[in-house]
Amino acid sequence: MSSYGVISSISIPILISIILKSIITYIIGLCIIIINILLIASLTRIKRLRTTQNLLLINVCCACIYFSLSCIVSVSLTMCILNTKNINSYLCQFIGFLVISSTHSVMLSYTLVTFIRFLTIIYPFNRKITKIHYIKNCLISKWILAIFLPGISLILPNQQIIFQSKAKICTINQQSPLLFIYFCTGYIIPFVLISLMNLVTYLNVTYSRQIPFLSRMKQCRLNRRKRRNLRLLRQFSFFTIIFLLGWTPFIIIEIFDKEGKLPDIFYLFTLILPLICILIDSTAILYWNKTIHHQIQLWWQSLIKKRPQIINHERNNYTTNHDSFSIDRNANMSSV
């Protein structure tokens, strides 16, 4: 099998649409990367936020950065293919693997956060759940799954990832059985698990009774912790729903339009929706966490005021040196 393929020429309107989509993808992807880098910097530098459970939030930020980078690389490969008219099948398979892996990474990150919050509410006195060793093992398992599941497409004998002529990206072949498998592992199963855990958590917090042989202070502290975890679960449910809404149009088109009857425009611009949803999720994390939001504002203010402070410092030094020179000169004149 040859490692190179050739594509036919495309019309001017489709080429303009691809260029416009690429520019939008670059802008949104860079915004996502910047926001999540700021979130990671805040979570690691603010002392009160250095908790074991915030490792899960750092993991979500890393997954969003991974997804943005994979989309940017995929769009860059598309522009290169359209420029050279040649398709490197091995490179196409690898880029398609990155996109599928990053998608699984984001969904599994949301599922893991929901799972840990679910356990802390169902078993509030089990300290093993919040230990750093337990959370690290969960994170390692999640990244192994996010890489192993899409990696199956690389080891199968037939070419599972191809350059889609309609979507103009390297993705799973519409005739491949892996399309439905990845649809389940990266879309249906995480959504069902998150919905069930949120439902059980909501019922547990809403209809929770007092635990016998527990003091009133500890009971109030326990209820406060449950309400806080429930609020966090609702937030990550919002993130999951937004991300699913972003992928739903393209997945529906991939599954039901196997004959390619829909216009190319539908394929091109439904691929921008996942990036827009990730941007909404990252901005929502930044907005809802007041400590991180305040820290980023302080960094921005210090960045703006840094140069005027340096200028004022130089002026003060000049004034001080001028005054000392005047005093020394007056002292010399008096001695004469």
Image: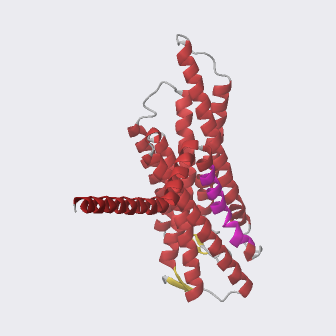
Q: How is the image coloured?
A: secondary structure
> Magenta part mainly helix, strand or loop?
helix
* Location of residue 306 with respect to 6 vertically, above or below: above
Can you name the residue that lies furthest to the left here?
A: 336
Is 331 part of what is drawn in magenta?
Answer: no
Would residue 269 be counted in the magenta stretch? Answer: yes
Q: Is residue 42 above or below residue 103?
A: above
Q: Quadrant of residue 164?
A: bottom right
Residue plotted at (27% across, 62% down): 333
Q: Which residue is pictured at 63% across the width and 36% down the height?
A: 231
Left or right of 322, for residue 54: right
Whether residue 160 is visible to the viewer of this picture, yes or no, is no
Q: Residue at the spot x=55%, y=88% of the render?
A: 84
Front-most of residues 61 and 83: 61
Q: Is residue 64 above or below residue 98?
A: above
- Camera-side residue: 152 or 57? 57
Q: Can residue 88 be seen here? A: yes
Tell how many labels: 0
The image quadrant where one finds the C terminus is bottom left
Classify residue 232 as left or right of residue 3.
right
On screen, residue 212 above or below 271:
above
Residue 267 location (% of width, % of height): 70, 71
Q: Position of residue 247 (x, y in %)?
A: 67, 59
- Give the residue at x 57% y 60%: 32
Q: Nearer the viewer, residue 15 or 314?
A: 314
Q: From which residue to which does the magenta span run?
A: 266-284
Q: Position of residue 283 (x, y in %)?
A: 62, 53
Question: Residue 56: x and y, percent?
Answer: 49, 45
